[in-house]
Structure formats: C-alpha cells, structure tokens
Amino acid sequence: MLAQLGYVAMAVDIYGAGKTTADPKQAGQWVAALETGDRAELRNRIAAALARLKSDPRVDPGKTAAIGYCFGGTTVLELARSGAEVNGVVSFHGHFGTGDPARPGQVKARILACHGAEDPFQSPAQIQAFEDEMRKARADWQFNVYGGAKHSFTNPDAGKYHVPALAYNKEADHRSWQAMQDFFREIFK
C-alpha cells in the first residue's frame, strides 16, 4: 500500500532469521525478548534497518519515516526515542511503555500514535505516562484515539485469533491510514 502511494517501502525482519508464527504465545515470547528483555537490541535492530533503507539508491535519506503495527508500533516509538535521524514515525496500536524514556531534546522524529479507545493492552496510566514522556522530551507528537476500536483495529483478520481484545474496525483502519498519509505530506513537504 505504501508503494502504491509512491513511497519506497521496506519490511523489517525485527525478530531475525526470518522467524514467523501464527501462534500468539510464540509471538509473545519473541516480543518479550526484545520489548522487556533487551530494549537496546531492539533499538540496534531498527537502527540497522533504517540505515539499510537510507542506503538504497531509490531513497532520499533526508526523507524517511517508519511505521509499525502492534510490536512494530512499539519498535518505531523506540526508534524515535533513540534520537534517530528520521522525519517521522507512526505507531498503529503499539505499546507506549519503555525502560529508556526519551530525554529532553532527544527525539528528532515527529510522532503520530494511532490508538484504539477500547484497547485493553494499554491502560490510561500507560497512555498518560507516554504523553508525559513526550512533553518532557519536547517532542513533536500527536495522539489519535479511535472510538470503539480495540487492539489490532487495522487487521481484517484480527477476529480469527478468537481473542476478545482484538477486533478489526474498518472506520478506525481507514481513518488511521488517512491520518498517516496526511502526516507524511506534512513531514515530507
């Protein structure tokens, strides 16, 4: 979809070694290993991916962004927190907590977070902590909340996992994608 909009797009193998799974428990273990276990390694991996993207001859290295869904959303927020030279990041139903919060002036990327109002995986306290972190860091950020949307609101297959916290929401999916396109127009002027 990004390529259809005219962007060079790259999918990142953040777990490494081409690992994939449809088993939520296995995915949870891989996520935990990077999200709560080794956040520095997560930042190293996404920084390496950004460097690879910027080295592509089709890419203007001064005009880059990163988007991510769920753990990918968490990952792009870590990229921004790290101070990476990227124009912007978009997190779709990502997690907002971190063991290494951004320091004042550290965040160079603009941030768009798209969140489902009915997502039980992020508490009001976690959301408030993220907002407070972004304020203290003096980041350029926006936080879009979509009413009636649960976790994985952009995934048409979310219901097949039979997890009550997951559900596709066509309106939130469309609105968040449109918000990302508007954000890209702004950051890539």
Image (cartoon, rainbow, N blue to C red):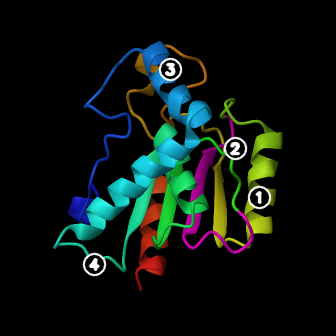
Q: Which residue is mark 4?
A: 60
Q: Which residue is mark 2?
A: 99
Q: Which residue is mark 1?
A: 133
Mark 2 → mark 4, Cα distance in angstroms: 32 Å
Mark positioned earlier in the residue sequence (2 or 3):
3
Mark 3 → mark 4, Cα distance in angstroms: 36 Å
Q: Amino acid at mark 2?
A: Gly
Question: Within 10 angstroms of label 3, few (less than 14), some, or many (20 or more) residues?
Answer: few
Q: Which residue is mark 3?
A: 29
Which element carries disc 2, helix, strand or loop? loop
Mark positioned earlier in the residue sequence (4 or 1):
4
Mark 1 → mark 2, Cα distance in angstroms: 12 Å
Residue 41 image point, x, y percent: 49, 42
Q: Amino acid at mark 3?
A: Gln
Question: Within 10 angstroms of label 2, few (less than 14), some, or many (20 or more) residues?
Answer: few
Which element carries disc 3, helix, strand or loop? helix
Residue 89 left/right relative to 13 = right
The residue positioned 22% from the left and 60% from the top of the image is 3
Q: Is residue 111 above or below residue 42?
A: below
Span colored in magenta: 103-118
Q: Nearer the viewer, residue 25 or 34?
A: 34
